[in-house]
Image (spheres, grey):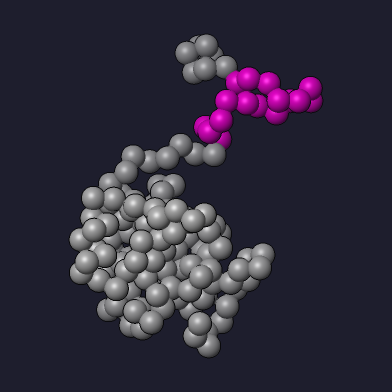
Amino acid sequence: MSNSLLCTIGRMAYDEALAGRIRDLIGPDPELTEKKMFGGLAFLIRGHMAISASGQGGVLVHVDPGRTGELIATTAATVAVMQGREMDGWLRVSADNLATDADLSPWVEIGIGHARSLPPKKTAGNRGRLNRSPRGLVPRPLARERR
């Protein structure tokens, strides 16, 4: 990993300078959120991960699964392996292949473009079917039952 500042998440670390470069390339975006996940810092659009400064170094990019083969064949990306399984639609690009913003920018654009192509995820308040109460977890009424 480069000599840039590292942030530690648990026992994993991600390259904070790389995360800053990703943030700068995305620019101001009201649909952008950042979240620590997969041992790195993920950049999400409408709740979908687009790209992450990976705790394994380099970036993890979420791409259209139909483009995985093309991108593997024409770039230095590799298919991401999570828990021993190759993940179609998830690519890793090593830090060595991201030396300049010109190297990084296409990956940011691909990840952001794919995330924008997906329907927005529900907010945390709308997820799940249980509410907390003093008596423990209770089922939340369906929207049509609340009327």
Q: Residue 123: where, in percent of width, then height? A: 49, 39
Q: Is residue 145 visible?
A: yes
Q: Is residue 8 left or right of residue 103?
A: right
Picture quadrant of residue 79:
bottom left
Picture quadrant of residue 70:
bottom left
Q: Is residue 27 left or right of residue 142?
A: left
Q: Residue 130: where, in percent of width, then height? A: 62, 26
As rendered, which of 11 and 31 lies closer to the eye? 11
Q: Residue 83: where, in percent of width, then height? A: 52, 54
Residue 42 sits above or below residue 121 on the image: below
As rendered, which of 52 and 144 lies closer to the eye? 52
Residue occupying the point 52% across, 17% down: 142
As rendered, which of 110 and 125 lies closer to the eye? 110
Residue 13 sits above or below residue 62 on the image: below
Q: Which residues are magenta?
A: 125-140
Name of the residue lying farthest toward the front: 84
Magenta-drawn stretch contains 133: yes
Q: Is residue 137 left or right of residue 107?
A: right
Residue occupying the point 54% across, 57% down: 37
Q: How many marks?
A: 0
Magenta-drawn stretch contains 100: no
Residue 5 sits above or below residue 138 on the image: below
As rendered, which of 95 and 31 lies closer to the eye? 95
Q: Residue 76: where, in percent of width, then height? A: 29, 73
Name of the residue lying farthest toward the right: 134
